[in-house]
Image (tube, helix red, strand yellow):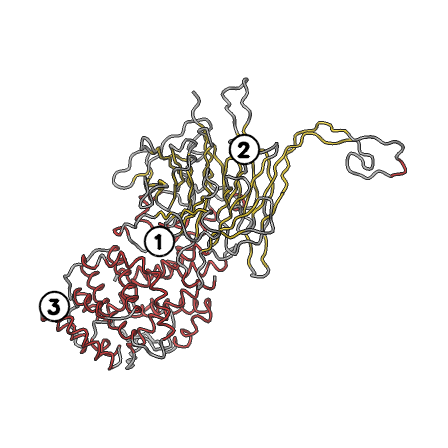
Amino acid sequence: MDEEIDTRKINNSFLRDHNYATEADIISTVEFNPTGELLATGDKGGRVVVFQREQESKNQPHRRGEYNVYSTFQSHEPEFDYLKSLEIEEKINKIRWLPQQNAAYFLLSTNDKTVKLWKISERDKRPEGYNLKEEDGRIRDPTTITALRVPVLQPMDLMVEATPRRVFSNAHTYHINSISVNNDYETYMSTDDLRINLWNLEITNQSFNIVDIKPANMEELTEVITAAEFHPNQCNTFVYSSSKGSIRLCDMRASALCDNHSKFFEEPEDPSNRSFFSEIISSISDVKFSHSGRYLMTRDYLTVKVWDLNMESKPLETYQVHDYLRSKLCSLYENDCIFDKFECVWNGSDSVIMTGSYNNFFRMFDRNTKRDVTLEASRENSKPRAILKPRKVCVGGKRRKDEISVDSLDFSKKILHTAWHPSENIIAVAATNNLYIFQDKIN
Amino acid sequence: MEYKVEAHRIMSISLGKIYNSRVQRGGIKLHKNLLVSLVLRSARQVYLRDYYGGICLSAQQAREWCEGEYMDSEQDKLVPGSTESLPESDGQSEVAVDKGEPINVVESPASLDVESQASGEQEHAENVILDSGCSDLKTTEESPEASATCEVSNVVTTISSNCISDPSPSNPKEATETPTDCQTDDSESVEENSHKPKVPRAYTNRKRSADDSELKDPLPKRTKVISPLLISKNDENKGETEEMDTSNVSSLITIFGSSFSGLLSSEDGAQPDSEVEDSDSGQICCDQMLKNLNPWSTAIVAF
């Protein structure tokens, strides 16, 4: 018993001290906006950092649109729920961009309990020549004013400001795990462990509950909702995934409360792989529609699966992300790594899918050629502008020169969040507190 | 026995996680704790099955598990079932279990028949739970011994669950809760039932004699507790494990508070070598199993 406790302590301290500059800097979500011009990241400290792509210039053709910091703001603060004596973390769980409709950019960011709509706008002019106050803000003494003047707009240095336009709060008892903007650009949904709520972007004081899987008796709880997303083209359709490895597709036209699904996607469990941890590794951590809306991708602990919306009985394709971990589930359970929620992304044409793994590895699978590649996001192993070298994990037997053995994988370096540019081959990979942006090789 | 140690270890780790989640920043995470409780349940099933596997071998315990009248009715059920489908020796083993003579493990057909004869949803729940734990065991290590234990515990469970199925004033609460757990294990049961025919029929005596030395009488009735932890006092490595378990258990009790008040009072009485042989100790065994199902769900409800 004592050794087990020690192992736990060792693992915990290892995770705390190793490679974490500050815990608040750990990136918790990454998202491109619909045009790909902006890239937003949220971190554990409640901050949102927005990067903007440089305009391509003819003078420097080789610097093909790099991303620079555009705006930084504190989206959420730590809160305290006095009624339940619970602290509410400020960690940003998800960011979703709204389609651009005017000069300003809008995004939704959420922590465990509250969703906020932020407006990011540029200001490059400011009014000067007020009558009642000086330029620096001091109030002018009215008795000294002898003439009136009209304020005029003068150019100024570009300033990007972010203002919270809506705050959607007090609608979730459990922790929000996803938000998704509807194709109608008027509504969005927020999902917690047991309920999904539908909001209008303009109205903050009410929301509609569209899915509720809370059992009457909490002792009968068997599954929770882990992720949800609206269909990219059909504003009435959405899917949500569960901790039991199933996905339900619902149609909001069928009824106000979508507890009854229209489609149910589940692959029967392989009985030969049954173990103590079968339930944990079958829990789906992310679900994403393809851009076409025809396919669905789900990520559980060891695999990525692509489903055809027309076939509910089994997935179309299954990709093994890191099957060599299957024999290590017990130790991964001990150090809590088995609970890591990896995300998955499609590329713009839905031909390649990408997801993260441990040791700062991330994997890409080409659905057409059936080829896959493992790459590493690390400063030591790749210089800027160098081509990434494919990595390989050696499962057993002889280890070749460049391979890494399973036992030397660093489980504290995990890539949970990745994003792919909506149209180009640019990817953003979050490795703990570092953000890596990779682009296709030029020419 | 490695399953027992492994299962026990996983159980303690899971309990530690549930405890730590209470002090984590951001509140208790429902998803993670649900998964941990599922692991805890699987490990406990494996652990309890090993425990009962050891116990059912002893004739004395088998006799004392059920009240006299239960046993009579069960004997009527069991013996015909076993004699119909089994050769004479197995029939004897069935009867022997009833009458308290140590004999070979009953083969799977007997237990299958017994299960089919037994009535009540609760009993099915018990079998289902053990079945699902059984296949856990099967996958962790495919060996005849594992199957032997599995089948033994099937018989054991049938006997004990037959006790449960009889309505008794003291058990209405537990009886209603078993179906609840039955629901959660239903998904597993469908798969597990298909495994039954595949379970090998060969059994060995070796495990039985080893288990004999580890036999332990069921704990006193008021033990509402994490009895696997206490049960482990009878492991081969008794000495230190007992003390560590006791201290772990007592710390867990203080953590979980009233859910485990039964343990606090009974701990003094649950000495390592307690030889409590109540006449209704069989009943108590059933109660323990049922009561054990409760604290975990209570823990979940607390979230």
Q: State the residue at coordinates (22%, 57%).
A: B195
Q: Does B254 sit above or below residue B281?
A: above
- Residue of label 1: A279
In the picture, residue B128 is in which quadrant?
bottom left
Q: Does B217 sit above or below residue A54?
A: below
Whether residue B208 sits left or right of residue B178 in the image: it is left
Q: What subunit carries mark 2?
A: A
The residues bearing labels 3 and 2 have C-alpha atoms spaced at a distance of: 74 Å
Q: Are marks 1 and 3 in contact (CB under 8 Å)?
A: no
Q: Position of residue B95 (x, y in %)?
A: 16, 75
- Residue of label 3: B86
In the picture, residue B66 is in which quadrant?
bottom left
The residues bearing labels 2 and 1 have C-alpha atoms spaced at a distance of: 38 Å
Three-letter amino acid code of the residue under disc 3? Leu
Q: Quadrant of the C terminus of chain A?
A: top left
Three-letter amino acid code of the residue under disc 1? Glu
Q: Which mark is residue A38?
A: 2
The residues bearing labels 1 and 3 have C-alpha atoms spaced at a distance of: 37 Å
Nearest the eye: A198 or B49? A198
